[in-house]
Image (tube, rainbow, N blue to C red):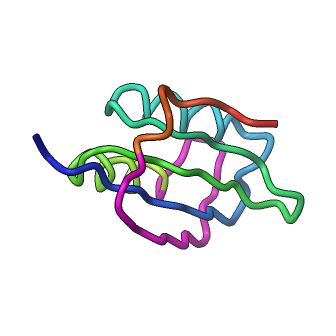
Amino acid sequence: MENLERAEIYISGRVQGVYFRAFTQEKAFNLGISGYVMNLPDGRVFTVAEGTHDAIVAFISDLKTGPTMANVTDIEISCSEGTGEFSGFSIRR
């Protein structure tokens, strides 16, 4: 079995109010990724994602594009070993 990887990702741009969190949750579900996504007070979106290396790479690629109405201008990624603490992928408020 492949090792679990964790990515903490900050997404900047026009990413709030444009279906970004629901888009992120849908992509995570389709890729078998667990974790969460939330809006930040500074206008960015933050997500913690855990999954296989290939799933995390595909997930990050999806986030760089975002949903149709979004305009991603920057993405910051910090990777580490997965913890296995999540049982699904949720939207946090």
Foreground of the two, 75 or 46: 46
Name the side, left or right, on which 14 lies relative to 36: right
Q: Residue furthest left?
A: 1
Relative height, residue 55 to residue 25 (above, below): below
- Rendered location of residue 76, percent (x, y): 54, 73
- Rendered location of residue 35, percent (x, y): 52, 40
Q: Which residue corresponds to the image point at 20% horizontal and 51% vertical from the top-left? A: 3
Q: Which residue corresponds to the image point at 32% horizontal and 44% vertical from the top-left? A: 51
Q: Which residue corresponds to the image point at 60% horizontal and 61% vertical from the top-left? A: 72
Name the side, left or right, on which 56 lies relative to 44: left
- Rendered location of residue 65, percent (x, y): 47, 53
Q: Residue furthest right?
A: 41
Highlighted range, magenta: 64-83
Name the side, left or right, on which 66 lies relative to 2: right
Q: Which residue corresponds to the image point at 33% horizontal and 51% vertical from the top-left? A: 56
Foreground of the two, 33 or 68: 33
Q: Quadrant of the N terminus?
A: top left
Q: How many marks?
A: 0
Relative height, residue 56 to residue 44 (above, below): above
| Residue 80 lies in the magenta-colored region | yes
- Rendered location of residue 52, percent (x, y): 24, 46
Q: Quadrant of the C terminus?
A: top right
Relative height, residue 87 to residue 14 (above, below): above
